[in-house]
Image (tube, rainbow, N blue to C red):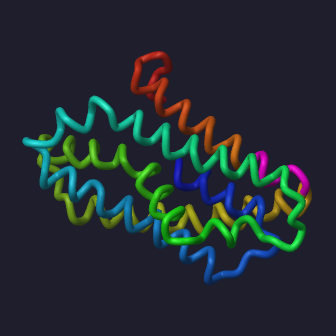
Amino acid sequence: MDAFAVSACYGLCMQKVVPKNAVIIGLYFGAFQFLMPLLGYVLAKSFADKISTYDHWIAFVLLAYIGGKMILDSFKNDEEENCGEKLLDFKTMLTLAVATSIDALAIGVSFAFLRVQIIPASLLIGFTTFTLSILGVKIGNVFGSKFKSKAEFTGGAILIIIGIKTLLEHLGVLGNG
């Protein structure tokens, strides 16, 4: 759902959804949601204690950074620039893909202890995320086209809220629901 929300943020500030860009977003998020449980599964015994103590902080910092950047960019008067497309660079997409999939690493660890068949489970997670991310771009774009002036600011705020929510859940302040 985090990948869906981030994808919707991208769609919010795109002038027009270019199918290629929606697929690129879907591929980043889907691929990482596929790979991270595999990685967690493989590293289950040796890595679980180390990542679980600070994974929420990593996700929070990454999402807050990208969200803050979007909010700052919303105050610039660049009518020509399409924020959704300028945020499609490798570094930004990699950062967001990692931030939204880091909890999937822990899920992979859980899958190892539960003896889940990891390949079919990861494929299902990756495909579902890919599909929902593309849908998120389109849904976000529908709202962005109606609220152009506030779309990038709103998208950034949503990313920061997702980061805060992730942090508070892992700290036990909010329930995991």
Of helix, strand and loop, which mostly describes the magenta segment?
helix
Is residue 174 placed above or below 67 in the rendered structure? above
Point 15% across, 42% down: residue: 47
Q: Residue furthest left?
A: 45
Task: Indicate the quadrant where residue 113 lies.
Answer: top left
Question: From the viewer's perspective, is 60 left or right of 125?
Answer: right
Instruction: Left or right? Give the position of 81 relative to 70.
Output: right
Identify the residue at image location x=86%, y=73%: 80
The image quarter containing residue 34 is: bottom left
Front residue of 85/78: it is 78
Specify start and end residues of the magenta stretch as a single range: 149-154
Which quadrant of the structure image shows residue 7?
A: bottom right
In the rendered view, would you say 59 is above or below 129?
A: above
Say which of 64 and 131 sits in front. Answer: 64
- On the image, the x and y values in percent for residue 152 come to 77, 54
- For image coordinates 19% across by 44% down, the residue present is 109
Residue 103 locus on image (x, y percent): 36, 43
Residue 41 on image: x %, y %: 17, 52
116 sits to left or right of 102: left
Q: Is residue 100 left or right of residue 138?
A: left
